[in-house]
Image: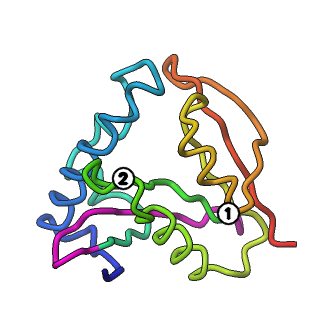
Amino acid sequence: MMIQKIDIKDRKNARKVLRLQKEAYKVEVKYLDSYRIPPLMETVDSLIESNEHFYGYFENERLIGVTAYEIEDNAFILSRVMVSPKHFRKGVASTLIHYVLQLEPNMEKYYVTTGAKNEPALRLYKKFGFKEVSHFQVVGIHLTKLMKTNV
């Protein structure tokens, strides 16, 4: 197992991330009751244009998990957590989240958003101290925003 930063501006890397993203987020469809999930609509170019910091979890040089975050107004936004469905329940997401949270330990607030019915994701984020702060809809998809403070 190895975690390393991914240069998302590199087209080859962006293609690998997008392939994994589409594979992982197809599972999210059942929790969101919609195929209109923004991560499924993304392109290589939209990933390349992203301002997020991407980190990959590699097993035998194969990308099996990715997380990404961005910093906005002194807040850490965990924008993506995705794992190949073949590697669910093996601690990949937890390892990635723990790793990126350690990269920015001095933020006042940390945020993550997930499907309101995605119980596995909600449990995972709550394990890291995130608490539900709001519920909202985007393109008819019910989402839950969670926050963790650095107190």
* Depicted 42 relative to depicted 129: above or below: above
Along the viewing direction, whichever of 62 and 91 lies nearer the viewer: 91
Range drawn in magenta? 58-75
10 Å neighbourhood of mark 2: few (<14), some, or many (≥20)? some
In the picture of the structure, the residue carrying the numbered disc 1 is 128
Residue 14 position, x and y percent, is 21, 61
* Depicted 33 relative to depicted 93: above or below: above
Q: In which quarter of the image is residue 116?
A: top right
* Residue at (52% x, 74% y) in the render: 100
Disc 2 versus disc 1: distance between alpha carbons? Answer: 18 Å
Q: In which quarter of the image is residue 30?
A: top left
* Depicted 63 relative to depicted 42: above or below: below
Query: Considering the numbered disc 1 on the image, is that residue within a helix, a strand or a loop?
Result: loop
Query: What's the residue type where badge 1 is placed?
Result: Phe
Residue 123 position, x and y percent, is 63, 47
Residue 36 position, x and y percent, is 36, 24
* Residue at (62% x, 79% y) in the render: 104
Res. 48 mark: none
